[in-house]
Image: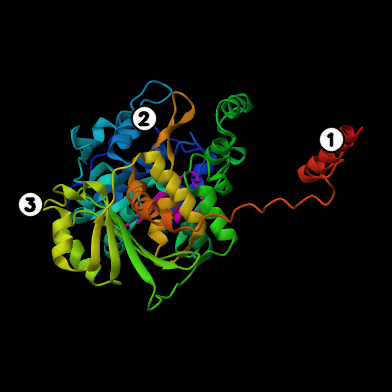
Amino acid sequence: MILTPARPRISLPNKFTPRPYQIPTLAALDSGKLRSINFWPRRAGKDLTFCHYTAKKSFERVGMYVHLLPTAKQAKKVVWDAIDNEGRRVLDWAFPKELRESTNESEMKIKFINGSLWQLAGADYFDALVGSNPVGLVMSEASLTDPMAWNYLRPILAGNGGWAAFITTARGYNWTHRMLMHARKDEANWHHSFLTCDDTQHMSPETLAQERAEMPDEMFRQEYYNDFSAANVGAILGKYLEQAEREGRMVPTIERELHARIIISSDIGYRDKAAFWWWQVRRGGFELIDYDEGSGMDAEEWIDRLRSKTRANTIYLPHDARVKTFQSRHSVVSQFLQANIADEVRVNPVSKKMDSINAARTVIKHCRFDSTRCSDGLDALRSWAFKYSEENRSFGAEPDHNWASHGSDAFAEGAKVLQLEIAPPPPPPKPEEPTAPLYPFGNLDSLWSQHAKHTARRTRV
């Protein structure tokens, strides 16, 4: 028999007591469920609760634990530098220094004394985590996060038996709404929690009334009541996509027509995401039959990927494709031309952002979407929104630059070209000729005739 020394007990200065509405979620994860999605209202203690929970789990199983927010900048502001209402640094409360071996401020990483690691990161650099083998994942503000981050990390957790928790507020009928619908059907493996401020009662009626008075109504319903139908607040194309849903222009499959013209519109980048839409031009409108996106690939890799899909008559590249991008010595235009993956390659001219937005709003009313192949692109279009200023409590004139920008900009690049093909509205009908004379004397010819007769009589007299 090999005797191992008993682990010394550590007396922690801080004690965390979950709120009543938080307990079912933590209990479900402790019971063995590996997936949990939680729609909780604003200021319901989402990040703080799961930082404490992760601290506990990191001492139950040695491994790496990741806390992910939409961007690294947001992660630093919301969690790493956060101060609670009592003036304490959130991290020092959730991860007491007695549990830490080291703290890396530049990488936002903590190593615990038992060997576990906790990493705070942004989903805008999620690909850097692919080789890290996390056994626990918290996706905070998941509705605002690039869904590709989950697609990259999901296989890792499936392979090592790790758990994942999603904490967010509603942002329309996007990928997290679909996840909630799935969780409700698969309660054997998933836990789900959907709460409003009436359920949590974590804010006083007076504070809520003040928030309602100072916020746009749609945003208030999103933030405090998780109202999915309020998704169009600040959204650039939200109401047009809802209209497409109502009119049956979102269909599971759209077949490629043999003789239909195909164009590809794009937004390109290497570190930033590249995105491509396939448009099928039909009489009276357009069909979006495919979508693809990805980051970290050079032009040659994209050429091979595009060659494996439907060949296009024309590929439209954004104006900056003339310069060196995709980490290459040659411009994207020259590489795409030499690759012969389309009949022609064109570069869109520079345009104002508002002109691109107006083109997208004009063209989308004439579009049908393959909701299966274009699901990632549709998520981007639904999440494309103007930047909101907490300080001014209003939306600005520029879109927020985030994961949704690239797919949306690629759509707008195509819309700028195709708006010229939309048939103008028919001219208004000509007014009918009046049935009664406009004047008592009839018309001008009749008036001159009467004048001539009157003049002749006066002359004879």
Say left or right for 328 vs 39.
left
Report the amino acid beneath label 3.
Answer: Arg
Residue type for callout 1: Thr
Asked if the magenta segment contains residue 168, the reply would be: yes
Is residue 11 in view?
no
Gap in Å between the C-alphas at discs 3 and 2?
A: 56 Å
How crowded pointer 1 is (Cα within 10 Å; few <14, some 14-19, many 20+) is rated as few
Q: Residue furthest top?
A: 87
The x and y percentages for residue 242 are 55, 54
Label disc, if present, on residue 455 of the rendered structure: 1
Sequence-wise, the earlier of marks 1 and 2 is: 2
Who's the residue at 20% across and 62% down the image?
302
Q: Is residue 393 magenta?
A: no
Q: Is residue 136 left or right of residue 380?
A: left
Circle nearer the N terminus (1, 3): 3
Residue on which the image places disc 3: 329
Camera-side mark, 1 or 2: 1
In the figure, residue 307 lies in which quadrant? bottom left
> 444 or 315: which is nearer to us?
444
Q: Which residues are magenta?
A: 160-177
For label 2, the residue is: 14
Amino acid tagged 2: Asn
376 sits to left or right of 222: left
